[in-house]
Image: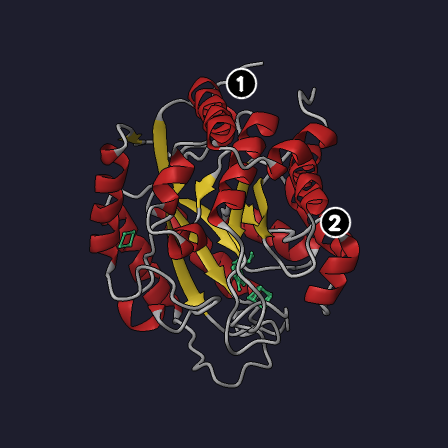
């Protein structure tokens, strides 16, 4: 892929704060989004099926050392019922997300993926780092897509924030997923303690280098029951700049307006949809469990149910003059414009 922007230019844009210049950047990204992926917004329903995690990422409320969190695990029939709800709500894709929970066997997850596929839904899995073999079994069972954010492209920062893993291992997982034919998503957080503007520029270049299909970018939000409780949060403007630049650099990828951005800025998701994003992910987790999936505090959509979130998203998308897509929104069938 030919990159139209080099690292220096990306850094200059990330430093930019003049409203006039930023409004030009956002308009360019919006036009690029229109040309490369069209005007439809794709809806992916997220099912947060377990908040158990064997890892200890310093930023995350689900980390294993957090003893203040009440843990839950949905049964396979409960998860399936959420997928049925997606179908009823005309949401064509479900995202099965959890912490890295050893409590589900790969066999069970395969049965689940296969069953949900039979509903005619597209299945995205987001359960962290697994072996090539596990990824292969899931793919063969019917999983279509996989989300695994690399969080930061800086190997040292990665080591500090994710003591159980390494950036190298993460990238290998992403490459394995691609090799297996998954539509592969990754992403990063903005405003991590110790992260520089140069690091964010490198994240954007790594998105392009990895040839990702989906890219999620959200602000870091400090969680009170983690070692980073005293750190500052990421800025909504910096997230929007990163979204816009990611669109301009990666052209026809699927980019969500993230829930974390909607959490720090009430209009954040609408703003992201107007500067490069083309995907939105309503929550389909049963209401009683939502409050427990506390990756970060004050998450939106905690007291709403799936029907309410679906309606809210319809209003949001039509409110900015866009339409909700009817099909599954695979990246590969979208137009590629040079
Ligand atoms: N603030 C914002 N996002 C977070 N995530 C985890 N912890 C936080 C936090 N404190 C994000 C990570 C992870 C995704 C599921 O949630 O990027 O990949
Ligand atoms: Fe677990 Fe993911 Fe949270 Fe890390 S970011 S503690 S792997 S849920
Ligand atoms: Fe959940 Fe708006 S998307 S209430």
In the picture provided, is 219 more to the left or to the right than 49? right
Indicate yes or no: mark 1 CB to ligand 1 under 8 Å.
no
Q: Which residue is mark 1?
A: 336
Point 68% across, 39% down: residue: 201
Within-10-Å neighbours for mark 2: few <14, some 14–19, many 20+: some
Point 34% across, 68% down: residue: 290
In this view of the protein, which residue sits in the foreground, 144 or 308? 308
Place of residue 313 in the rendered image (x, y in percent of width and height, measured from the top left):
27, 44
Under circle 2, the secondary element is helix
Is 85 drawn above or below residue 107 in the view shown?
above
In this view of the protein, which residue sits in the foreground, 132 or 174? 174
Q: Which residue is mark 2?
A: 172
Place of residue 279 in the rendered image (x, y in percent of width and height, measured from the top left):
41, 38
Q: Quadrant of the C terminus?
A: top right
Asked if the residues shown at circle 2 and circle 1 are in contact, with their CB atoms under 8 angstroms apart, the answer is no
In the picture provided, is 178 more to the left or to the right than 96? right
Residue farthest along the top direction in this orientation: 338
Under circle 1, the secondary element is loop
Quarter of the image holding residue 93? Answer: top left
C-alpha separation, residue under disc 2 versus residue under disc 1: 27 Å
Is 67 drawn above or below residue 135 in the view shown?
below
| Residue 145 visible to the viewer | no
């Amino acid at each position: 892929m030919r990159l139209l922007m080099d690292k220096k230019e990306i850094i200059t844009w990330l430093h930019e704060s003049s409203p006039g210049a930023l409004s030009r950047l956002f308009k360019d990204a919006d036009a690029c989004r229109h040309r490369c992926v069209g005007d439809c917004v794709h809806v992916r329903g997220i099912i947060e099926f377990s908040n158990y995690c064997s890892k200890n990422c310093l930023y995350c409320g689900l980390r294993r050392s957090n003893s203040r969190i009440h843990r839950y695990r949905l049964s396979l029939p409960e998860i399936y019922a959420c997928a049925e709800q997606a179908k009823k709500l005309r949401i064509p894709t479900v995202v099965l997300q959890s912490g890295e929970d050893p409590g589900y066997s790969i066999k069970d997850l395969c049965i689940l993926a296969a069953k949900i596929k039979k509903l005619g839904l597209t299945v995205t899995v987001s359960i962290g780092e697994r072996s090539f073999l596990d990824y292969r079994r899931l793919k063969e069972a019917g999983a279509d897509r996989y989300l695994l954010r690399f969080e930061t492209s800086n190997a040292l920062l990665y080591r500090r924030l994710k003591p159980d893993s390494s950036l190298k291992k993460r990238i290998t997982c992403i490459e394995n997923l691609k090799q297996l034919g998954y539509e592969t998503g990754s992403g990063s957080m903005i405003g991590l303690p110790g992260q520089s503007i140069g690091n964010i520029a490198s994240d954007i270049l790594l998105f392009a280098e990895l040839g990702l299909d989906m890219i999620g970018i959200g602000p870091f939000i400090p969680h009170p029951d983690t070692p980073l409780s005293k750190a500052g949060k990421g800025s909504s403007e910096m997230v929007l700049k990163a979204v816009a630049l990611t669109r301009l650099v990666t052209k026809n990828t699927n980019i969500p307006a993230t829930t974390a951005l909607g959490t720090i800025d009430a209009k954040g998701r609408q703003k992201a949809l107007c500067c490069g994003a083309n995907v939105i992910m309503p929550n389909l987790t049963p209401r009683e469990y939502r409050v427990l999936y506390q990756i970060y505090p004050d998450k939106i959509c905690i007291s709403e149910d799936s029907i309410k979130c679906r309606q809210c998203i319809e209003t949001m998308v039509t409110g900015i003059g866009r339409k909700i897509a009817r099909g599954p929104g695979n990246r590969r069938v979208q137009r590629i414009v040079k």
